[in-house]
Amino acid sequence: MTSPDGSRERVYRLLLGEEEGDVPAADCLGGAVAVGFSLLTYAGGSVEDLGRCAARRHVATLYATHGGAFVPYILGAPAFVNRDFATLYGAGVPPDAALRAKSGGPASPSPTGGPDEPPWPECLRGEIAEGFNLVRYEGRSLERLEPCARERNITAFYATRGGAFVAYIPGAPALVNRDFAGLYPDGIPSGSYLLAKSDGPPPARTAGR
């Protein structure tokens, strides 16, 4: 809309077919959305609410990980295309679920989150299966990431920057992991989500650990 004198202009967006109370809040998906791939967290709720929330953040496709494989949810696709994702979350998507997102833009910054959660007792939180897994890192320091990877039999980590993946290969020379280290000059914030690749289940823990 433009003011009568033409000096001011404001853009409004109408949501058709949805009551105002049905529109998810802007912070339903935590994390910055870049053009390309991003790692996000969902506040929890139904798959339908997740779809509406993702549309507000200009996300085209979401991926969960299950059993080491990606399970896609393509916004606007027929139900049979998203059947595996809907089955995975038949009882609803749990709070703080980690998801990989693909967006064609525009990008959007991370919404303001709530207070930090208390530290988790393990360095990595989440399922580790052969293949790819979305995990939450609680170790903070970059130096802790490598022994943490050995504990969980992880061969590579991936963060996202500018819509692209940046790899960290445990045991590789510093030159190989330079870009990843450059992302976290002050350490990895506790609670950060990473994509982890594993070649098999973690080794069995011995008694007393």
Image (cartoon, helix red, strand yellow):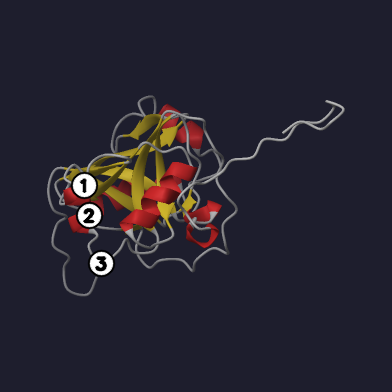
Residue 86's label in the rendered image is: 2
Identify the residue under disc 1.
79
Of the residues under marks 3 and 1, which one precedes in the sequence? 1
x 14%, y 47%: residue: 130
Q: Quadrant of residue 123?
A: bottom left
Q: In which quarter of the image is the N terminus?
A: top right
Name the amino acid, label 2: Ala
Q: Position of residue 184 (x, y in %)?
A: 50, 39
Name the amino acid, label 1: Ala
Residue 153 visible in the current orientation: no
Q: Separation of disc 2 and disc 3 at Cα? A: 9 Å
Q: Where is residue 116 in the image (x, y as percent from the top left)?
A: 54, 63
x 58%, y 64%: residue: 115
Name the amino acid, label 3: Ala
x 17%, y 65%: residue: 205
Q: Quadrant of residue 169?
A: top left
Q: Position of residue 13 (x, y in %)?
A: 59, 40
Mark 3 residue crowding within 10 angstroms, few (<14) / some (14–19) / many (20+): few
x 41%, y 35%: residue: 160
Mark 1 residue crowding within 10 angstroms, few (<14) / some (14–19) / many (20+): few
Identify the residue under disc 3.
91
Of the residues under marks 2 and 3, which one precedes in the sequence? 2
Q: Separation of disc 1 and disc 2 at Cα? A: 9 Å
| Farthest-out residue, front | 4
Q: Are marks 1 and 2 in contact (CB under 8 Å)?
A: yes
Q: Is residue 13 left or right of residue 139?
A: right
Q: In this view, does 189 lie to the left or right of 39?
A: right
Element type where label 1 sits in the image: loop
